[in-house]
């Protein structure tokens, strides 16, 4: 995306912060869709998830699942008109615990940093899971719990979020919607590896914030299928 489109999208997202929230019926339908798809997905994927869990357990030391704190929805910004500005800017969003299949060798005290394509911490099995994004299947539980939606901006770690909010204009606007397993940025860009990647993806995230709808979510879900099958943007 060009810088001009990025600036235009940011202005649209800022304008929307002064509008009324979407009709409750629309949000109810989207929530129902998320619950239905996540429930069916867990049932259908259960045999695959059990197989993945077994392989992870047998091939490297450590737990099967990996959990980590991420920054979620900021309800003070979610479709509400601006009130107490100080409160709107300080929190970033409600923290929650995200679940994934473990893809790295277990170690204590790892800093909050992005993984890289040649990251020595990633196991052989973990690399395969990341390529097909199978490590994210446990996040269907996060969807059922209401921490996430199927579609939305990817949630970030608190320390990294705090830095990006200062470095990337409009970054905090992403928290106006629930984070997602997939999203408009994810079907157009690869995993974040640098601040430059974030600058490229933020325009997609803000564009989604402006255009979010049930139809938009369905379109992105369909677009996600070839991204996963053909390993687009993964490593």
Image: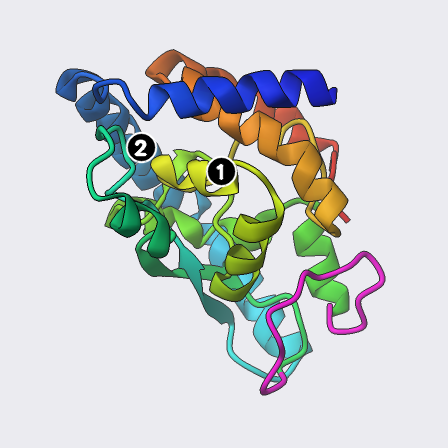
Mark nearer the viewer, 1 or 2: 1
- Residue in the image at 67% along x and 52% along y: 130
Q: Is residue 116 magenta?
A: yes
Whether residue 100 is situated above or below residue 62 in the rendered picture: above
Label 1 crowd (10 A; few <14 / some 14-19 / many >=20): many
Whether residue 96 is situated above or below residue 196 in the rendered picture: below
The residue tagged with tag 2: helix, strand or loop?
helix
The disc at residue 54 is none
For the question of whether residue 234 can be seen, the reply is no
- Residue in the image at 74% along x and 52% along y: 193
Asked if marks 1 and 2 touch (Cβ < 8 Å), the reply is: no
Main secondary structure of the magenta stretch: loop
Which of the pair 213/1 is nearer the observer?
Answer: 1
Whether residue 232 is situated above or below residue 211 in the rendered picture: below
Give the x, y percent position of residue 203. 60, 27
Question: What residue range appears in magenta?
Answer: 107-122
Give the x, y percent position of residue 215. 39, 12
The residue tagged with tag 1: helix, strand or loop?
loop
Whether residue 191 is situated above or below residue 101 in the rendered picture: above
| Identity of the residue furthest to the top in this view | 215
Give the spatial CA distance, label 1 vs label 2.
Answer: 15 Å
- Residue in the image at 39% along x and 19% along y: 15
Give the x, y percent position of residue 201. 64, 34
The disc at residue 153 is 1
Tell which circle, 1 or 2, labels the residue nearer the N-terminal end. 2
- Residue in the image at 14% along x and 21% along y: 24
The residue pinned by badge 2 equals 34
| Identity of the residue furthest to the left in this view | 24
| Identity of the residue furthest to the bottom in this view | 108
């Amino acid at each position: 995306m060009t810088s001009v489109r990025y600036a235009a999208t940011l202005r649209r997202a800022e304008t929307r912060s002064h509008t009324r929230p979407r009709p409750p019926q629309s949000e109810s339908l989207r929530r129902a869709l998320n619950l239905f798809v996540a429930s069916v997905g867990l049932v259908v994927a259960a045999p695959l998830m059990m197989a993945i869990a077994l392989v992870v357990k047998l091939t490297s030391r450590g737990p099967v699942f990996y959990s980590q704190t991420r920054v979620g929805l900021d309800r003070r910004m979610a479709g509400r008109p601006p009130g107490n500005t100080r409160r709107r800017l300080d929190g970033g969003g409600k923290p929650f615990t995200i679940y994934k299949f473990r893809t790295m060798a277990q170690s204590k005290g790892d800093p909050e940093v992005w993984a890289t394509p040649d990251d020595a911490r990633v196991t052989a099995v973990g690399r395969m899971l990341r390529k097909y994004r199978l490590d994210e299947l446990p996040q269907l539980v996060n969807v059922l719990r209401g921490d996430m939606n199927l579609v939305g901006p990817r949630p970030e770690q608190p320390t990294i979020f705090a830095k990006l909010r200062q470095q990337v204009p409009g970054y905090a606007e992403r928290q106006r919607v629930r984070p997602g397993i997939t999203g408009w940025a994810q079907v157009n860009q690869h995993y974040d590896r640098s601040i430059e990647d974030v600058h490229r993806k933020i325009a997609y995230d803000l564009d989604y914030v402006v255009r979010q709808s049930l139809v938009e979510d369905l379109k992105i879900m369909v677009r996600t299928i070839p991204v996963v099958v053909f390993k687009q943007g993964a490593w």
